Image: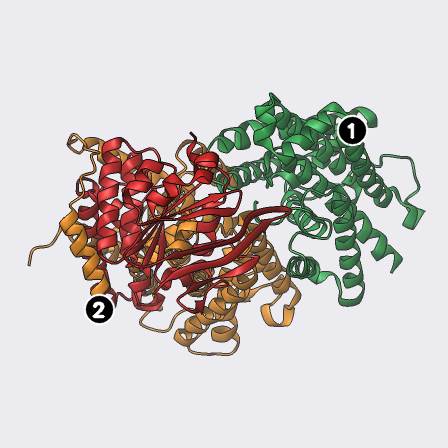
Amino acid sequence: MTLAARDITKRFGGLTALSQVSLELKPGEVHGLIGPNGSGKTTLLNLLSGYYRPDGGKIAIDETDISSATVQRRANLGIARTFQKPRLLPTLSVLDNAMLGGWRDARAGFLATAFSLPQVKADERELRSRAGELLHGVGLSHAIGRRANLLEHAEQRFLEIARGLAQRPRFILLDEPAGGLTAAEIEHLGAVIRVMRESGVGVLLVEHHTDFVFRISDRVTTLDVGSVIKHGTPDEVRRDPEVIRVYLGA
Amino acid sequence: MFVALITGLATGALYAAAALTYNVMYSTSKVLSVTTGHISMLGGIFGAWFISTLGWPIPIALLGSMVVGAAFGLLTDLIAIRRVLARSDEHLWLLSTLALATMVQQAAGLWWGTEPKPFPRLIPQDFSAGLGDQKYWLPIAIAILLAVALEVFYRRTLYGKLFVAMSEDAFAARARGIPTGRIRSMSYVMAGAMGGLAGFAAGQLTFAYFALGLTLTLNGFIALAVGGLGSNLGALVGGAALGILSAVATYFVGGEYQQTISVGLLMIVLLLKPAGLFGSQSVRPV
Amino acid sequence: MKLSNRSMAILIVMAALIALPWWAGDLYKLHLAALICAYWVLIGGLNLVVGYSGQLSIGHVGLLAIGAYCFAILAGTHGVHPGLAIAASGALCALCGLLLGLPSLRLPGFYFAMATLAFALIVTEITLAQGNLTGGGVGLSVPGFPPPFDTPRGTYWLILAIAALVTWLTWNVARHTWGRGLVAVRDSAVTAQAVGVPVFRAKLTVFVFSGFTAGIAGALFAVLQSYITPDTFVFELGLFFFVCIIIGGRGHILGPAIGTIVLTALPEMVAPLAKLGNFFYGLLLLAVVLLVPEGIGRVFELLVERFRPRRSESHVVKPDLERLAKAIQAGKSR
């Protein structure tokens, strides 16, 4: 089971944002994706989760081509993601936000829901307990009943992760999850990511905190101006002269 | 047939003028204001009141209508746009302009009455002029004049260029020190004066009628969407197409299905070319 | 059996509403109550569209008109059983909702609002044009309900029952997964997609449902009016429905319900407001948009929060890794 981008090219008008980029994400690994601003990290993430269509190359889960699948379809195939700027539903409670992640498991249709059939109630109970456990797990037990707009930045980040995990994903794509976190919170984040890895979830980590990425990733891919300049273990990437030149600095 | 056609063209010209009014406000604020048609409604009603009741000379009354329109434009910006744009919710401006439009329409109805009242002759002309009657030619002339004047304004004047800069990238414009708030107010005042002028010029065609605003808001928008949001040429072509189509339809099917037909036109254009005939922007950012 | 406070409150309100014919005083007030309930049948459905999925439909009066004419033509002109005619009104309007929603729900906000406005005007145009079906400008008289619903009380109880049913249905939708999905469609379509909500289909589903309730409401409304003309269904009525929801607060059910009651009853009780009519609604809408964009319902919520004992609120994130691992594993083995 592998989520893979193969020779992906993406253009916006005359600008080539990504050119011939390949990347593989396996279950149970943390894959770091680093690179300077504008190198195409978020673009690649948007291509993987389906918000953009590639102009060349393909995106596949194993051998199944999903290049033209909608975002919803990919969510149902087990790809979850978080956003650079957390996108929560401000008027709903923290628990409801996490439960939103369970949409694909709520099999009841609109009419069944309207008449509150037993199946709906059973789904609801299951979702509620799942979301509750995940919220305790990521460290939001103090905020379960709170409205999401009352959360502080770090709490929002962890809530997005809980929502993603409530989707029971095979792969989770994290877009700069450490952005704006304190050192202690980054440690918590690292612990949470390790648990996801040990539980067999494939984690794609797009991040600027390179120390954090090198510490936690199994493999790292470095992008610059839309191309992969180095791919390998954290140690290999850290020592690569090209990576040092364009990104890490001397 | 010719009478139907010229009536259609004149009505279409009024729709085109409303579409131009939309464009001016949209350029600086990215807001499609529900009050657009109501500006022209005020222009028509106040024009009739200035001339028939107060006995003002026609040029002064024309100026008065434009001032009323401009004042209402400024009011729209102050009440319904300024505070709402500061928030991020994209639906709020639709609600606030809708609320203002409803209030103005009802106030006009209470003050002016709900019956359409005739609009006085502006140029001495015999009523037997037929196709050459001023009630047809005035709106057409004004719509073309407004479109040409706008193009000149955008291309030749400093403020026009500021409008264009804001319409392309308001954020960058602010970063470069352009007083975006003031420019937006100016554009609303300008749009108000244009709408007032158009309502005044089309008064003999539409009568001074309080409920004109909503129809004009809708049909002006259809002309705009058909022609392409942001394009002044598109506004003219969209208005003309709408006018001619409803004239032809009136001639062959009868006048009962005007609205149905104009919406049909809109749907066909949006299906074939979502950005409108002359539109460059995609429809999405709205 | 111990009842929660909420169930108690609901029981008391229901009992008071059922007993209304005895304490309302006169027949006019009873008629007004029935009218509010009929409006609510429409507004309750529309609430899922406007308040939950965030689609600003200002032209639902068109659907109300179709429902009303459908009932009047079937039950009046053709003598179909009124119960059947009501169902037919609902079905026809659900179909109209589907036909209107299919092209227009893909459009951005302002385009959609204009499409619904155009729809309302088109319906008026067609009712005027199809004179031999609708009576044109002259209108149609509408038959009442058969016994036991033919008295003012019976009519009121029937409409109240339907309104209660609609409330229950929308409440069920709102509080389950569907409700969260709709709010996601409203507040962040990107998030909705990311968790797998089919955005367009969700919008269309609730829009069709709102068409159905609008059709039922149209039939009930027609009976209460007993005579309908195109002037009964002015565009401003559609605006009124819309304003009730926005003022009551998006994402709530109780707020819009109170909005409906107050906005219907107030102009009847306070004569000067009736004269101002839509000006008053416009002013209210403007005030709400500028001062409390989340609606009056939110003001009450904030007040309640105010008086609740405040605990010192922690914001510290402390993951429980064992629990997290178990929770993820539980999801895998499902």
Q: Which residue is mark 2?
A: A118
In the image, taking residue B75 as reference, residue A154 lies left or right, namely: left
From the image, state the color of chain A. red
Total marks placed: 2
Disc 2 crowd rating (10 Å Cα; few below 14, some 14-19, many 20+) is few
From the image, state the color of chain B. green
Instruction: Give the image location of residue A125, x and y in percent.
Output: 19, 60
The three-letter amino acid code for the residue at tag 2 is: Pro
Q: Which residue is mark 1?
A: B62
Foreground label between 1 and 2: 2
In the image, taking residue C95 as reference, residue A220 lies left or right, namely: left
Q: Residue C34, relative to residue A177: is it above or below?
A: below
Report the chain holding disc 1.
B
The three-letter amino acid code for the residue at tag 1 is: Leu
Instruction: Give the image location of residue B121, x and y in percent.
Output: 84, 37
Residue at 65% in and 57% down:
B270
Residue at 25% in and 53% down:
A197
Q: Secondary structure at mark 1?
A: helix
Asked whether residue A74 is in view, the answer is yes
From the image, state the color of chain C. orange
Q: Residue A239, relative to residue C90: is it above or below?
A: above
Q: Quadrant of residue A187?
A: top left
Report the chain holding disc 2.
A
Q: Residue furthest left?
A: C1
Instruction: Give the image location of residue A173, x and y in percent.
Output: 36, 51
